[in-house]
Every structure is written in C-alpha cells, then in structure tokens.
Image (cartoon, rainbow, N blue to C red):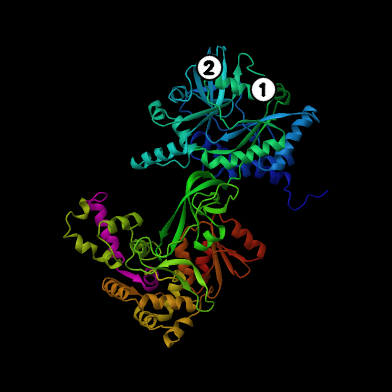
C-alpha cells in the first residue's frame, strides 16, 4: 500500500530522527550540564514526542543509541563521577485527562486487574534538580546528581550545606538507604538571589530551577552555602532491605527519619480521584512559593511496581501529568498604570510570581480599561495568566470559583505622572471613544518626555550611537537632557559643567569623546528619519517616508500640518496622500499646532540639517513589486535591504501572500520560503537581488 503524502519514507524518517537526536542532545546538555536551557519545557516535550513517534512508526530507528534509552545528559567533567547502583530514570509525560485514564487502564491491563481498588500516590512535580542521597547506618556519606541516569556528579560537599537535608537520619540503622528527591529554590529566595546578582553585575538566573541547579553545581561549597536551597524526598534507589510495602508508607517512614516530604502528596483511588487532586494542586500553584510543573502519579503497591517494571527510560508504574506549559493560575496583587511615549495609560497587573513557559512571570498586561471592566478583574482575584513565545504575559480570565476582590477597579482619569487630564479620543465618524486613555500633558509629562527622547535617539529614528535607553534616563535624571535639542547642545554645555561628564559614574574620557562624535555625526539626517523621530502619533516609519516624499522639504510639511484644521484645504491635501488619511492628518495638526512643540522644533532645526530622501527609481525592474526578504542576509542588514528596495520603488512586506511578487532568500530561510514555493512565487538569492537591481 502506498504511503500517504504526510508520512515520511524510511530514509526521510531516518534523517529527521538523526536531526532531532542531535537537537535534543544539545538541549539536554544545556539543561542538565550547563543549567541554561534555551527552549521552554513545552517545546522540548514536542521534540521528544516527535522523536518517539518516528520510532513507533519505524522500529528500526530505536537502536541502543536512541535517546529513548537514555536519561538526561552525561555528567560534567568538573565533578567526580558517581555510578548509581539503581539507575535514576525519568518519567513519561501525559498532558490530558484522557491520557491519565489511559495510563490507569494500561496498568490494570498489564496486571490483569479488571476490578477492585488500585491505589496511586499523587504528588506535585517539583521543578528543580534531582538528587540522590546515600545514607549508611543513618549517616549521609554521598550525594549525586541524576546525570545521565546511570552516572551522576558527586555533589556531597555542596549537599551538606543544605539545611533541610539531615546529616543523620533519626531512627534509621539500615546499612544502605539511598533517598531520592528534588533540590529547589523558593520564589522569595530566587528574587533575593537575582537582586544580589544584579547588584554585583553578574548574570541573572532565568528561573528558580536554573538558580537551584547552578547553586548546587558550584565548585566552591561556600557559594552553595550562601544560597538557600530546599529539598523534598519522593523516592529511593538502593536499600539494604525493603522499607515498606507501599509508596505511601515509605514516604511516612521518610518523615519519621527527619526527611521533608511534600505535604500535598495524597493517596488516590483511581483516575477520577487523581484528576481531582491534579486540579486542586494546580489551583494552589501560585501560592506554594516554589515552582511545580505538574503532578506525578505512582502505583502505591511496591509489589505491583516491581511486577510492572520499566520500559525504555521510564517506569510503567509512574507518569508525570504536566501542566499546560504556557498558562498558570496566580493572584493579582495590584494594578499599576504606566504612561508610554504617546501618553497612553496602560494598566499592568502585579502578580504573585509564577513560572510560565520556563520564565518567572510577575507582571502582565491588562490592555486597557474596557478589558478590565469586561473581565471584571479586581485586585485580589485569582487569575489565569498566559505567556506564548515572546508575547508579553496577559491575563486570560478570572477564576470565579475563587474568592473575589471586594471592589471593582476604577481606572484613573488623570495622568499618574503629571496630573494632567487623561482622555479617550472620540472618533469623528462613529462617535465612539478610543479604547486607550491618554495623558494630554504631552510636553510637561516626565513619562512622555523620557520615552520621547528614547524614541528620538533610537536606531530607526536619529540613531545616536551610545545614547540608549539607560543613558537617556541617566541624562534626564541628571537634568542634562530634557528636550531633543538638548542632545545637540550637550557637547557645548558639558565644557562648563561641574563635575564634567567624564568624572561622572559610568563615563570616562573615551566614552564621552565617542558619544560626542556620535552626536556630531547625526547633525545631518534624512528628512524621513527626522519626521519619524519626532514621535508624532500615528506617524511610523512608513508614513514618515510618505510625508517626506510628498512634501519634499520639512517647512512645507510643517506649515501645511499647522494649518490643517478640519474642513480646510490643508487638511484635504494631507488626506489625499496615498496611505496617510484623516487619522494621521489630525495627529499632524495636533502636533504642529501645539506652541510648545513649535518652539522645540525651532531649537532643533538650528542644530540639524535635513537631507532629502533619495528619489524612487520608478524605472527599476522591481518598481511597483511587493518584495519579501527572509533568512540571514549577508551583504545588507534587514533595515538596509528594506530601504534599498523602497528606493527602487518596491513595496516591502513582512509575510508571503498571493500579492507577493518576489522573495529574496538568504541562508536559514524557513516557512516563508516554503510558502513561496507553495504559491509559485519567484525566489532569488541576495546576489541575484543585487544583479537585478543593477548593483553588480
């Protein structure tokens, strides 16, 4: 029977399997050895699932070298090695209620148990570093990390600094007892550690798991001792004799020895009970004070565990039920208002810290006041927070079953930074209010002043090298730069300052000289960059270019915009510019008719010279075409490629569609290249682009 188009051939599967194996092994090394993962748990799980699916479809791929036979990564060369007498294997993962029910059903089938009670323990899956503690006659003699499951790293000296790990077990005289558990760091301790790292100018940890792993795997035990680590025991390896006949009983015995066991562990009877406890733990996740990423279910009867045994790198008798990677429940502690460069008042949720998708989330956007009202979000509510990829975390919904905040949130009608009125613009056509409330104190509001200066000096605007966000904030706070024109008068004024700039913290003679050279280099700037740098509402880079091409010189734009009151000839002239329209026309009029802005423009134009935009080559082979650049360009930056294409009369788009005429692809081009092939769109290389546009 012919394979379906979606199924790979054996050769294709073998190639994909090998590629995935290399990628997963690299991620394992970064996670287990370097404590610096570069992808989220969800993305890693997806790679693993695909890798395992290929082996199920093509069993010949499941060789002895397969990653499905291995756990973690090889131990670091920095530490002495410890061979585990009993391998420290990992767990299989499930992600849905149905998969949990299937797990229970599989266990029953394997054991031949159709009816009757079958107990499981359910415990939080701590997001930390797995560790094995070897006790002999009750005394701690050795500690090791999981490593690759068969051989780990000797971290005995470091483990002895962890207060929650007893050096001697109470009432335990077993010749050998190997206790297994998780070393972790609390949210509070993680925040304090990162604050110390920042103060010392050191690298910050991404999340508590990385912080715990990095702290335990220090070559100097004194460093580990300075970092508060915690430990939960959950299992065992080698023992000189069996402790109890049930998982639950062993955990109780651990407690009697003085080991800490997670108090949320529960004995459950069947899938329904397990899922109910899973949801109960998920609801408490935000208030635990430490990270968990799921719930682990284990068959309670140890005799049944032994009958079930292991498959590949995981036991048949246990499984991890992972939480959705990009969502979590937490508590909304406060709502603060941030004022942006354009005066927009944006509500920000201050949250009880929770790890979502591998990142600790403490803040989330609430978008606007209508969104707060629609979702009835109140301070004190339990909320669901979502983070997907690099998107700013956001609140998805309020958990209505939890205790509600007592009072609905009242959105302010004055700017919290300057006290000016904060208003919502009314659409002339519909009469509806804009969803965003804005401060009207444009040039007196300190929040807008700093953000406008940052925008003015930014890369795509005036591009003043060495004058980034931190430098702008420093100069503003020191009173050295309050307006855009102050940037260009700074070199002259600096000569009369006391102390001089080179004598201030963070600066020296060389850095001051470089900064002044960068300022001098921007005294001549293309008119479109200058227009964009002014930060006029609704005037981005594209509209700045349209206005520059239409008006040719800045004074013509300035006079027309200043006179562009509704209904007048000047307004009609701006409205008629292709792609601009009435919204931009109104914003231009509001900006240029403001006397404060007029005075600042006069001061600025005394300092800079505006150069015309290069003429559009309307006869070029790409004039009028829609072009998409993708992949890594080697001769141009992406911004340079875009500017060049527009100079040749082309329109540059960010995605491939039926309207695309040409795709310029560099190395590493991915989905856009595939889309172009599907649509039959012409694809050329960067060198071919230069040849086609007559640049050699």
Task: Please say whether residue 509 is one of the residues in the magenta stretch.
Answer: yes
The rendered magenta stretch, by its main secondary structure, is classed as helix
Q: Residue furthest right?
A: 1
252 or 391: nearer the eye?
Answer: 252
Residue in the picture at 68% in, 30% down:
120
Using the numbered discs, state the Cα–Cα distance from disc 2 to disc 1 in whole angstroms: 21 Å
For residue 163, above or below residue 642: above
- Relative to residue 447, is residue 573 depicted above or below? below
Q: Earlier in the sequence, mark 2 or mark 1?
A: 2
Query: Mark 1: few, some, or many residues within 10 Å (few <14, many ≥20)?
Result: some
Q: Which mark is residue 205?
A: none
Q: Is residue 407 visible?
A: yes
Above or below: residue 251 compared with residue 272: above
Which is nearer the eye, 627 or 545? 545
Q: Residue at x 57, y 20 (%)?
A: 178
Residue that lies at the very extreme toward the front in this rendered image: 406
Please state the horizontal and vertical placement of residue 529, each as a whole percent of the image.
39, 69
Mark 1, residue position: 246
In the image, the segment drawn in magenta is: 504-533
Foreground of the two, 299 or 81: 299
From the image, state whether disc 2 or disc 1 is nearer to you: 1
User: Residue 65: x and y, percent?
Assistant: 64, 32
**Placement of 18 over or under 82, stated as above or below:** below
Residue 60 in view (yes/no): no
Horizontal side of 125 relative to 102 (left or right) equals left
Give the total of numbered labels. Answer: 2
Identify the secondary structure beneath mark 1. loop
- Image mark for residue 135: 2
Q: Residue at x 60, y 16 (%)?
A: 239
């Amino acid at each position: 029977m012919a394979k379906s188009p979606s199924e790979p051939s054996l050769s294709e599967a073998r190639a994909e399997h090998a590629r995935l194996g290399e990628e997963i092994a690299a991620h394992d090394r970064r996670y287990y050895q370097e404590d610096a993962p570069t992808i989220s748990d969800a993305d890693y799980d997806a790679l693993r699932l695909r890798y395992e699916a290929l082996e199920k479809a093509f069993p010949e791929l499941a060789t002895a070298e397969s990653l499905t036979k291995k756990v973690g990564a090889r131990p670091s060369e920095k530490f002495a090695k410890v061979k585990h007498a009993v391998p420290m294997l990992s767990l299989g993962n499930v992600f849905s209620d149905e998969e949990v029910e299937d797990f229970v059903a599989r266990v029953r089938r394997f054991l031949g148990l159709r009816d009757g009670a079958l107990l499981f323990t359910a415990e939080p899956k701590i997001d930390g570093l797995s560790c094995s503690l070897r006790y002999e006659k009750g005394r701690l003699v050795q500690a090791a990390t999981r490593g690759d499951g068969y051989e780990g790293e000797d971290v005995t000296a470091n483990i002895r600094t962890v207060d929650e790990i007893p050096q001697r077990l109470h009432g335990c005289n077993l010749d050998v007892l190997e206790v297994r558990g998780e070393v972790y760091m609390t949210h509070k301790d993680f925040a304090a550690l990162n604050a110390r790292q920042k103060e010392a100018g050191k690298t910050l940890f991404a999340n508590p798991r990385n912080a715990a792993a990095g702290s335990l795997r220090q070559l100097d035990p004194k460093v580990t001792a300075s970092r508060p680590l915690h430990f939960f025991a959950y299992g065992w390896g080698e023992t000189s004799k069996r402790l109890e006949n049930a998982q639950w009983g062993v955990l109780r015995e651990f407690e009697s020895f003085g080991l800490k066991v997670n108090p949320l562990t529960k004995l459950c009877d069947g899938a329904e009970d397990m899922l109910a406890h899973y949801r109960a733990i998920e609801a408490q996740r935000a208030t635990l004070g430490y990270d968990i990423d799921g719930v682990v279910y284990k068959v309670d009867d140890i005799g049944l565990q032994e009958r079930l045994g292991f498959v590949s790198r995981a036991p048949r008798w246990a499984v991890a039920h992972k939480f959705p990677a990009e969502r979590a429940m937490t508590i909304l502690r406060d709502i603060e208002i941030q004022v942006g460069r354009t005066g927009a008042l944006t509500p920000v949720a201050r949250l009880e810290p929770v790890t979502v998708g591998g990142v600790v989330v403490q803040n989330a956007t609430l978008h606007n006041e209508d969104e707060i009202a629609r979702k009835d979000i109140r301070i004190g509510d339990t909320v669901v927070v979502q983070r997907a990829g690099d998107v700013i975390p956001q609140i998805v919904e309020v958990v209505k079953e939890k205790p509600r905040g007592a009072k609905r949130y009242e959105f302010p009608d004055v700017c919290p930074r300057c006290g000016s009125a904060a208003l919502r613009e009314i659409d002339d056509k519909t009469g509806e209010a804009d969803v965003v409330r804005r401060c009207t104190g444009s040039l007196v509001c300190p929040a807008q002043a700093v953000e406008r200066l940052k925008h003015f000096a930014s890369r795509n605007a005036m591009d003043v090298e060495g004058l980034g966000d931190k430098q702008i904030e420093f100069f503003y706070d020191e009173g050295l730069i309050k307006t855009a024109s102050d940037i260009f008068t700074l070199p002259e004024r600096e000569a009369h300052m006391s102390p001089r700039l080179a004598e201030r913290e963070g600066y020296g003679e060389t850095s001051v000289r470089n900064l002044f050279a960068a300022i001098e280099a921007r005294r001549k700037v293309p008119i479109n960059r200058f227009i964009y740098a002014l930060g006029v509402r609704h005037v981005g880079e594209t509209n700045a270019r349209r206005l520059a091409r239409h008006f040719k010189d800045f004074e013509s734009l300035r006079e027309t915009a200043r006179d562009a009151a509704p209904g007048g000839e000047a307004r009609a002239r701006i409205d008629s510019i292709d792609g601009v329209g009435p919204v931009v026309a109104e914003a231009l009029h509001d900006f240029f008719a403001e006397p404060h802005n007029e005075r600042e423009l006069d001061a600025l134009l005394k300092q800079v010279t505006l150069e015309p935009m290069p003429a559009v080559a309307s006869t070029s082979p790409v004039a009028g075409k829609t072009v998409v650049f993708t992949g890594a360009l080697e001769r141009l930056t992406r911004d340079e490629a875009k500017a060049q294409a527009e100079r040749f009369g082309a329109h540059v788009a960010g995605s491939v569609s039926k309207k695309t005429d040409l795709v310029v692809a560099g190395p590493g081009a991915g989905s856009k290249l595939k889309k172009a092939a599907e649509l039959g769109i012409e694809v050329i290389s960067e060198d071919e682009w230069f040849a086609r546009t007559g640049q050699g």
